[in-house]
């Protein structure tokens, strides 16, 4: 019995090409080792080498030559199945006539062709036959049965090279490594070409240069291994939206007897009660009817739209122009573009906890490390500023702040913002300000933009029409560049952003045309009404929920559309906020997002955009649910 390394194909070669008979030639440089990885035997020169051969465990299987009796039938069947597969594949991929392959007839083959994987990979049946006919004239021909031929062919197609002595095929890296054939154990002179080994007289005529380029070593370098392998990029697979994942993980159905009330998604259009300003709709209809805005826009956005944003966000002390504005695919697109411009893989960015999950999703995708700083639930969700210096290092590319906040519903005070700016200045770190809820603040709170306050720290502020103007589907957002000390300009960040805007012409032409109207006085009353409604709903939410045992709003909302509610899930017999929210959905058909979605366990987030009657119904159900589950 002979043990050797190889797969079924190799076993076949051993048998069919007679290397077994040639075993007198075998020079046992290697011993046989038991491999704990593959639970099989390995040939190797030293034990260490055998241990190192972990890759063999994947690509090779050690089998016995067919004198072994066990499983023979199974193996034969598998062999035949494999053969049929190869026949089918070959005939499809290379237009090889099935009849030419299926019979057991003998095939005349030029053995040199099996040293030309690129030929076999790319040529048709006719080409192959033609070459073999030519070879016949040169006496370069061997006869083999179809099956052997096909096994050779299949492996040659993978880019494996054959041993000139026994024709057994092996991956080029292996031949390179050992310098001798793993089947017949003949030494392979890598400097020689296969033809030189097989037909020495004839090859004498070739020049040294020709010989060198055909050498096995060089051919093995030229081998391109192509097989069907359409696989997903690492990047894409690592792109995960935690909300989607967690919500899908909840894996329960709402109670079929109760209408679902989704207080989970931050889409103000969800219930139809909040609407885009009417005047803006008139303008949009007009723009569309005029057929005047169907063309490509400037990649940064058109001048009228950008000027209207610049006007809106200019302040007494700091005026901005259209050149400081880039239109984007919503706030999300703005954030993606900024992270792309500021960060290299391996850099890190500070983001809030609790916070909007998209920050992490985008940063993960770019290979940027996420570092969380905490917001204090008992201090109106202000930043725990003392944490920031500890999180920063030489590769910190940005501090992301989100004000007014999703999910917290908080609004930073003037003094807190000044404190943030002071620290950012001390740490020399630019601020990315997600201000998608700008001006959406309730009485007692005022919105300041970081851009208007920052004398020194560069601010990249982002916003959109999504929430302010109740039009998330428009996908129209912007970046406002505040760079009073020209720090971003010096570092080419602005140039980078402009270049990134050219990847795809994102800003949709008709929607841009409506921006001046949205920011004009004609839409002001709609905006004021929107915020009043939200404020009323926020108050109703806090009033209703804080009366429920086990729930508390540690900091009442000051703006945006959200409220974070603390839930003592254990007092209701639940493990955590996730289980609490899952069960609420199952029993009461009310969907809220567990705090875990925002890195904030023990909380859940409520979106209070729904009509008051709907909120009222939802809150009664939540009350009943909490009361039913109280354990004492
Ligand atoms: C909704 C939201 C966004 C995304 O806004 P789009 O303009 O729709 O992309 C970004 N940041 C925060 C904090 C949000 O709540």
Image: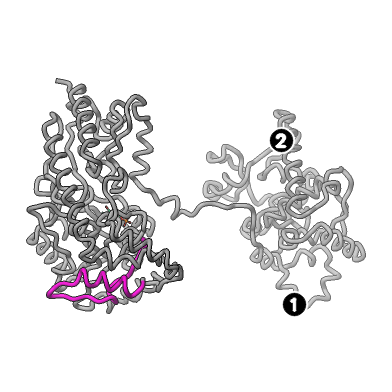
- Which residue corresponds to mark 2? 78
Residue 595 against residue 288 in the figure, above or below: above
Residue 242 placed where, x, y %? 34, 45
Q: Which mark is residue 31?
A: none
Give neighbour class at mark 2: few <14, some 14-19, many 20+ (Cα, 10 Å): few
Q: Earlier in the sequence, mark 1 or mark 2?
A: 2
Can residue 471 be seen here?
Answer: yes
Tag 1 and tag 2, C-beta contact below 8 Å: no
Q: Nearer the viewer, mark 1 or mark 2?
A: 2
Q: Residue furthest top?
A: 632
Q: Indicate the quadrant containing the C terminus: top left, top right, bottom left or bottom right.
A: top left
Side of 51 where 367 appears, left or right: left
Residue 603 placed where, x, y %? 20, 39
Q: Indicate the quadrant containing the N terminus: top left, top right, bottom left or bottom right.
A: top right
Residue at x-position 73% and y-position 69%: 214
Tell me where the magenta segment starts and ends, as one range: 302-329
Element at label 2 = helix
- Which residue corresponds to mark 1? 208
Residue at x-position 75% and y-position 62%: 119
Pick whichever, 139 or 551, lies toward us: 551
Residue at x-position 22% and y-position 72%: 311
Quarter occupied by residue 40: top right
Can residue 403 be seen here?
Answer: no
Between the residue at mark 1 and the residue at mark 2, the CA separation in whole angstroms equals 46 Å
């Amino acid at each position: 019995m002979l043990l050797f390394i190889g797969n079924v194909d190799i076993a076949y070669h051993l048998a069919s090409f007679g290397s077994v008979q040639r075993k007198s030639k075998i020079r046992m440089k290697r011993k046989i080792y038991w491999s704990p990885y593959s639970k099989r035997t390995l040939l190797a020169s030293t034990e260490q080498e055998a241990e190192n051969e972990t890759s063999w465990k994947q690509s090779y299987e050690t089998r016995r030559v067919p004198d072994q009796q066990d499983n023979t039938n199974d193996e034969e069947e598998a062999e035949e199945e494999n053969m049929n597969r190869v026949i089918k594949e070959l005939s499809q991929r290379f237009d090889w006539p099935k009849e030419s392959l299926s019979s057991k007839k003998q095939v005349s083959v030029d053995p040199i062709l099996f040293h030309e994987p690129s030929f076999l990979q790319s040529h048709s049946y006719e080409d192959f036959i033609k070459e073999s006919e030519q070879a016949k004239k040169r006496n370069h021909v061997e006869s083999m049965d179809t099956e052997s031929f096909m096994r050779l062919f299949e492996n040659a197609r993978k880019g494996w090279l054959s041993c000139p002595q026994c024709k057994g095929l092996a991956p080029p890296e292996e031949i390179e490594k050992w310098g001798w054939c793993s089947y017949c154990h003949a030494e392979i002179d890598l400097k020689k070409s296969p033809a030189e080994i097989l037909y020495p007289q004839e090859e004498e005529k070739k020049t040294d240069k020709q010989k060198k380029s055909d050498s096995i070593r060089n051919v093995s370098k030229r081998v391109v291994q192509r097989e069907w392998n359409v696989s997903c990029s690492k990047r894409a697979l690592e792109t995960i939206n935690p909300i989607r994942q967690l919500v899908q993980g909840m894996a329960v159905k709402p109670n079929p007897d109760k209408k679902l009330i989704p207080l989970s998604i931050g889409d103000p259009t969800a219930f139809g009660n909040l609407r885009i300003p009417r005047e803006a709709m008139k303008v949009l209809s007009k723009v569309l009817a005029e057929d005047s805005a169907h063309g490509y826009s400037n990649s940064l956005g058109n001048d009228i739209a950008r000027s209207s944003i610049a006007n809106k966000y200019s302040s007494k002390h700091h005026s901005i122009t259209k050149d400081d504005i880039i239109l984007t695919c919503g706030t999300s697109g703005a954030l993606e573009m900024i992270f792309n411009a500021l960060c290299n893989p391996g850099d890190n960015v500070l983001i809030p906890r609790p916070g909007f999950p998209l920050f992490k999703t985008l940063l993960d995708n770019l290979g940027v490390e996420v570092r969380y700083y905490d917001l204090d639930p008992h201090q109106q969700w202000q930043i725990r500023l003392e944490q920031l210096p500890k999180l920063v290092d030489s590769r910190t590319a940005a501090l992301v702040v989100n004000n007014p906040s999703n999910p917290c519903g908080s609004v930073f005070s003037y003094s807190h913002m000044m404190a943030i700016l002071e620290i950012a200045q001390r740490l020399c770190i630019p601020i990315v300000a997600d201000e998608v809820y700008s001006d959406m603040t309730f009485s007692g709170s005022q919105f300041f933009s970081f851009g208007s306050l920052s004398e020194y720290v560069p601010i990249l502020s982002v916003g959109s029409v999504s929430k302010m103007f109740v039009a998330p589907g428009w996908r129209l957002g912007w970046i406002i560049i505040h760079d009073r000390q020209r720090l971003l300009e010096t570092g080419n960040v602005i140039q980078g952003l402009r270049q990134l805007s050219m990847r795809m012409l994102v800003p949709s032409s008709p929607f841009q045309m409506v921006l001046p109207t949205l920011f004009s006085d004609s839409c002001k009353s709609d905006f004021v009404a929107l915020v009043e409604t939200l404020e009323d709903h926020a108050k109703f939410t806090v009033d209703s929920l804080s009366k429920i045992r086990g729930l508390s709003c540690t900091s009442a909302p000051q703006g945006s559309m959200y409220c974070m509610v603390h839930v003592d899930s254990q007092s209701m017999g639940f493990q955590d906020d996730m289980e609490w929210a899952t069960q609420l959905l199952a029993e009461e058909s009310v969907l809220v997002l567990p705090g875990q979605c925002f890195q904030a366990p023990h909380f859940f987030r409520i979106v209070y955009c729904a009509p008051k009657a709907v909120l009222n119904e939802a809150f009664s159900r939540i009350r009943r649910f909490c009361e039913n589950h109280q354990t004492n």
